[in-house]
C-alpha cells in the first residue's frame, strides 16, 4: 500500500529496498509475528556524520504518504 501511497500523492518516488537502517522494524516484529512493517522517512544523506543532511523538501511529501496510509489502513488484508 505504501508504494501506492507514493504513486497517489505523486510528489516523490518510492525507492523500495532493504537497508540496515530498519533496525526498529525487526524489534517490533518480534512482538507480533506476521505483522507487515515498513520504514519510511524523508531523504537524509551522510547519516551519523558531521555532513548529515536532511532534505527539508522531502518532509511534507513523506507526511502525505503517512497520512494516506492511515486513511487507507482498512484496505490492508481486506479489512
Image: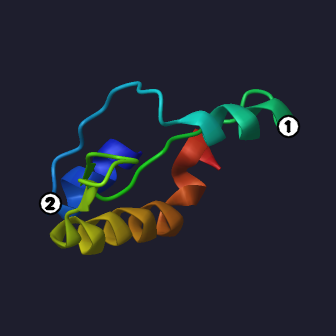
Q: Secondary structure at mark 2?
A: loop
Q: Residue 10: which numbered mark, if any?
A: 2
Please state if 38 lies on the left or on the right of 64 as rendered. right
The reply to whether residue 34 is visible in this rendering is: yes
Q: Residue at 14%, 60% (x, y): give it.
A: 10
The residue that label 1 is drawn on is 31
Q: Residue at 25%, 68% (x, y): give it.
A: 61
* Residue 31, position as x, y percentages in the image: 85, 37
State the residue in front, 53 or 15: 53
Vertical order, 24 against 17 (above or below): below
State the residue in front, 31 or 34: 31
State the residue in front, 13 or 23: 23
| Label located before the other in sequence (1 or 2) | 2
| Furthest residue in direction front, as rendered | 50
In this rendering, the count of numbered labels is: 2
Mark 1 → mark 2, Cα distance in angstroms = 34 Å
Amino acid at each position: 500500500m505504501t508504494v501506492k501511497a507514493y504513486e497517489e500523492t505523486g510528489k516523490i518516488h518510492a525507492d523500495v529496498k532493504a537497508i540496515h537502517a530498519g533496525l526498529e522494524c525487526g524489534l517490533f516484529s518480534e512482538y507480533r509475528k506476521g505483522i507487515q512493517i515498513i520504514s519510511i522517512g524523508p531523504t537524509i544523506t551522510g547519516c551519523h556524520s558531521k555532513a548529515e543532511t536532511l532534505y527539508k523538501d522531502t518532509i511534507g511529501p513523506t507526511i502525505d504518504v503517512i497520512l494516506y496510509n492511515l486513511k487507507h489502513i482498512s484496505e490492508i488484508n481486506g479489512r
